[in-house]
Image (cartoon, grey):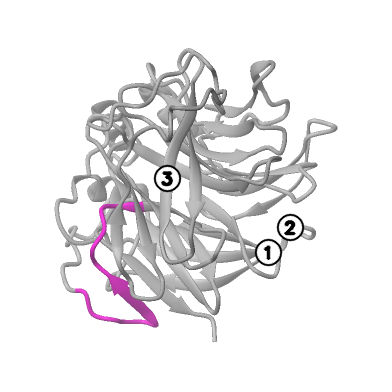
Amino acid sequence: MHRNLPILIAIAVMTAGCSSDSFTPILGCEPDNQLTPDCRFQNPEDLALTPSRRAVIVSQFATMDGSAPGSLARLRLADANIATFPLGPGDTSSAEPSWGDVSCSPPDPATFAPHGIDLDIRSDGRHVLYVVNHGGRESVELFEVKDGGADVHLAWRGCVEGPERAYFNDVVARSDGGFWATHMMPKDSQIWPMIKGGIFGGDTGWVYAWHPATGYAKVAGSDGPFPNGIEKSADERFLFINMYMAGEVRKLDLVSGKVVASAEVASPDNLTWSDDDDLLVASHTAGLSQQMECQSLEAGSCGFKFEIVRLDPERMTASVVVSNQGAPMGAATVALQVGNELLLGTFAGDRIARFSLK
């Protein structure tokens, strides 16, 4: 997996003079350190549990700049069967309005490049998967999730192209048919924001809100250094925003537009809700030089150190649940609770790892 050149240059500037161990991809696929890998994926960067809880939708990441395609896949939990979803509209015989912007056309399957995803239920009772897409355009794609339990199908229902210069990372649904999406930095000008955020801790992006009637608006109080993963409280009063280059998770009150609390978490990537209503945050604890080396991975998995952090959303106190460096998997980007296990995905590797909570 290769990021685009401007980001590589920026990271190289930030890590000049830093030393790191030589990069050795993890090619074996044996269990180790309480982690059991499944090595049949392409950079499973984000994960979502289906409504029946019998399958997981996998966002198979390719590149940040959309120069290579990725895919959406289904991992069936009962027998570990994997299937890639074909992309295309659902039944077009009806005159059903688009779920996004009515002027937005379907994505090109040949260039589709998914990143962050979120699965939620609509007001009409149907389930929708929101997908950040970098391929061919910067957009959020909307798919209806048809969950029969034994199998799952996706039908494209609409999309929303990003505003000018938008560069999305993650997305979370709103109950009014809209969504919130993290905007990392300007897509057409990346070197200076990466240096500004990585070295000086300056703000590089913010959160966008989108509503069918009003379009995009910047969320007050959401500016920060490289906004990454995002989640909402059940009542949609608060957003939890991972500020990757600030090393913190911020709790933003949408009524006041103020950050009311924060927690120190090293380079926080994605976050999900646990079954007991805590947040699970994937944290990158390796140096930036090691992270840069993982951009050139061509086989196996990156091994840089990560932690999965449990975060109390009320007190914003954190505790480490999983910590690993090297085999069988590093560079975790997401932890998804499925029963008594966590499924861990990565942006740089061919595997998902299971961790038992028992």
Name the side, left or right, on which 73 lies relative to 239.
Answer: left
On-image quarter of the N terminus: top left
Question: What residue does disc 3 label?
Answer: 154
Q: Tell me if residue 332 comes above or below residue 105 in the rendering.
A: below
Is residue 40 part of the magenta span, yes or no? Answer: yes
Amino acid beneath label 1: Asp
Amino acid beneath label 3: Leu
- Which stretch is magenta? 29-44
Q: Residue at x 27, y 73 (%)?
A: 327
Of the image marks 1 and 3, the number of the one nearer the N terminus: 3
- Mark 2 neighbour class, 10 Å CA radius: few under 14, some 14 to 19, many 20 or more: some
Badge 1 element: loop
Q: Residue at x 61, y 45 (%)?
A: 126
Which label belongs to residue 313? 2
Q: Residue at x 45, y 71 (%)?
A: 323
Q: Tell me if residue 200 comes above or below residue 162 in the rendering.
A: below
Which label belongs to residue 310? none
Of the image marks 3 and 2, the number of the one nearer the N terminus: 3
